[in-house]
Image: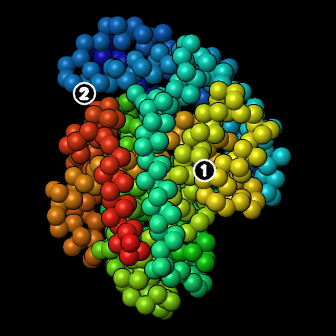
């Protein structure tokens, strides 16, 4: 075997073990007994030790030096392995294991604190996580910016400064649109009623099928915080149910189907290689958001959904499909990011981005986080946070150490805006299928232009080639303005 063959064979085993570790995380979020938290933390720590040892194996360096690529995909795989090898070797095995153990514990502590509205029960643990993440960032940054070092794990090639500049471009138009919408004379009616869990889950499965979710390679479960997990032949989704708000369940499902379909759509030849996963979280989010919003919340699909929901729940308090479309896209002040409308969603992300940059830099201490969050939320949204579960405790990301992850949600929206513009040009009759509950023309376009490539291309190059334009917030902002000005009669 050549050095390249040895390298790829070794990587396959590492990727397989990584998938097992990821499935342990899925299990913890869905079906693990509550009393198993400490055991799972030890298991996750042990798995991370094994993975860290493999990822820093000196033979990888030798194989990389000797490997001779035959194809461009070979070269890209070598580049990705070399990048990960260099980064992993900067992190001590002790730190990697302790982070895995602590974040597994922190997840359970966060969930209990959230349920009790008791941030004081969680903040000491968050402080420990933060100290470890700062240590990790310092090891990776090699004297550079700490936040950029963490961001590299989620959006390679991106920096905090570039994101801040992008968000500064977006914020004024988003705030102006929100203010116009909330002040409009025409206001959509809210959906009201009781919507049983069993019926919501049946509808959620129908929505997932409408967007092409491959049930032979996936499954759907309930979780406190919806997520997707896995890749290749095993890519799972979760959703949640609020019996007074079926949109929460249905659109969380469509969102996670976007994530999972990305993994299911990657060229199977890339399985168990560095190319066999989504290339970045921003690109990942572009898929979930374009499924959920540009297709799922458009007039064509909501017309189909109105018929399905009216039948399933023996009628709705909404008069017709046009009014239902406005209801689905209703803009209201709210605390929860995952439930936020398209106009305000990115403003939620920007808040978290600024706070976590300050946490990593040391400009903000965990003991001051609740006050910092509440003050910023009041300033940005004009509403006082009523309880911690609706404020600083609402997201699990910091508990599990995902510093640098939040901004990719807004970046994914920017990417989705660019992709939607190109997709609509290439598939002019997309809405005809969506009106029948068939998103296949859109999902096939995304699979061909984005998903099948996996990690073959760097994130920015992938989006720019698919969208046939430089990355810009303009398509997203124009789409939002056109859509919501129409709904609200502005």
Which image quadrant for residue 135? top right
Q: Residue at x 21, y 73 (%)?
A: 432
Q: In the rendered image, is residue 287 in sight?
A: no
Quarter holding the N terminus is top left
Using the image, determine if residue 428 lies above or below residue 61. Answer: below
Q: Quadrant of residue 80?
A: top left
Q: Position of residue 37 (x, y in %)?
A: 74, 45
Q: Where does the image place residue 188, in percent across and percent down from the top left?
A: 47, 79
Mark 1: secondary structure? helix
Classify 10 Å Cα crowding around label 2: few (below 14), some (14-19), many (20 and above).
some
In the rendered image, which residue does mark 2 sit on? 73
| SS at badge 2 | helix
For mark 1, what is the residue? 27
Compared across the picture, whether 43 is left or right of 303 comes to right
Do residues under tags 2 and 1 come within 8 Å of each other at their CB atoms?
A: no
Residue drawn 43% across and 53% down? 173
Residue 13 shows which numbered tag?
A: none
Is residue 23 rendered to the left or right of residue 103? left
Alpha carbon distance from label 2 to label 1: 33 Å
The structure's colour scheme is rainbow
Sequence-wise first label, 2 or 1: 1
Q: Residue at x 42, y 43 (%)?
A: 169
Q: Quadrant of the C terminus?
A: bottom left
Q: Give the quarter of the image for residue 277.
A: top left
Task: Answer few, some or many: residues within 10 Å of disc 1's Cα (few below 14, many 20 plus, some between 14 and 19).
Answer: some
Where's residue 299, x and y in %? 33, 74
Residue 247 drawn above or below residue 19: below
48 or 369: nearer the viewer: 369
Nearest to the observer: residue 205 or residue 414? 414
Left/right placement of residue 79 relative to residue 390 reads: left
**Picture mark count:** 2
Q: Nearer the viewer, mark 2 or mark 1?
A: 2
């Amino acid at each position: 075997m050549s050095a390249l063959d040895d390298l790829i064979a070794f990587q396959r085993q590492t990727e397989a073990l990584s998938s097992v570790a990821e499935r342990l995380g899925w299990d913890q979020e869905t079906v693990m007994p509550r009393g198993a938290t400490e055991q799972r933390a030890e298991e996750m720590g042990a798995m991370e030790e094994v993975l860290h040892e493999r990822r820093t194996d000196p033979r990888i360096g030798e194989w990389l030096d000797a490997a001779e690529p035959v194809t461009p995909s070979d070269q890209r795989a070598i580049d990705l392995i070399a990048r990960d090898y260099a980064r992993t070797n900067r992190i001590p095995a002790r730190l990697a294991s302790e982070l895995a153990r602590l974040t597994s514990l922190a997840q359970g502590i966060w969930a209990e604190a959230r349920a009790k509205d008791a941030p004081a029960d969680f903040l000491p643990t968050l402080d420990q996580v933060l100290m470890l993440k700062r240590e990790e960032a310092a090891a990776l940054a090699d004297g550079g910016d700490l936040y950029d070092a963490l961001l590299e794990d989620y959006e390679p090639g991106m920096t905090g400064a570039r994101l801040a500049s992008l968000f500064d471009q977006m914020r004024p138009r988003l705030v102006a649109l929100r203010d116009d919408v909330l002040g409009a004379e025409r206001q959509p009616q809210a959906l009201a009623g009781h919507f049983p869990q069993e019926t919501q889950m049946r509808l959620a499965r129908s929505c997932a099928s409408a967007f092409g979710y491959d049930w032979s390679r996936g499954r759907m479960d309930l979780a406190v915080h919806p997520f997707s997990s896995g890749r290749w032949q095993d890519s799972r989704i979760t959703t949640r149910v609020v019996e007074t708000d079926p949109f929460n369940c249905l659109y969380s499902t469509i969102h996670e189907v976007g994530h999972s379909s990305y993994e299911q759509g990657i060229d199977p030849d890339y399985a168990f290689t560095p190319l066999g996963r989504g290339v970045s979280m921003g690109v990942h989010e572009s898929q979930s958001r374009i499924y959920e919003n540009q297709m799922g919340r458009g007039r064509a699909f909501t017309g189909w959904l109105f018929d399905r929901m009216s039948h399933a729940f023996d009628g709705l308090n909404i008069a017709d499909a046009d009014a239902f479309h406005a209801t689905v896209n209703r803009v209201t002040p709210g605390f929860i990011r995952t439930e936020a409308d398209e106009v305000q969603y990115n403003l939620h992300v920007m808040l978290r981005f600024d706070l976590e940059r300050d946490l990593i830099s040391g400009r903000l201490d965990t003991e001051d986080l609740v006050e910092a969050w509440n003050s910023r939320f009041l300033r940005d949204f004009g509403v006082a946070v009523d309880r911690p579960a609706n404020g600083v405790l609402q997201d699990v990301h910091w508990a599990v150490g995902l510093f640098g992850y939040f901004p990719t949600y807004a970046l994914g929206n920017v990417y989705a805006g660019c992709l939607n513009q190109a997709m609509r040009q290439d598939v002019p009759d997309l809405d005809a299928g969506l009106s029948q509950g068939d998103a296949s023309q859109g999902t096939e376009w995304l699979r061909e232009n984005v998903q099948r490539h996996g990690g073959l291309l760097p994130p920015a190059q992938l989006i720019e080639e698919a969208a046939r334009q430089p990355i810009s917030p303009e398509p997203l902002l124009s789409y939002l303005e056109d859509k919501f000005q129409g709904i609200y009669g502005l």
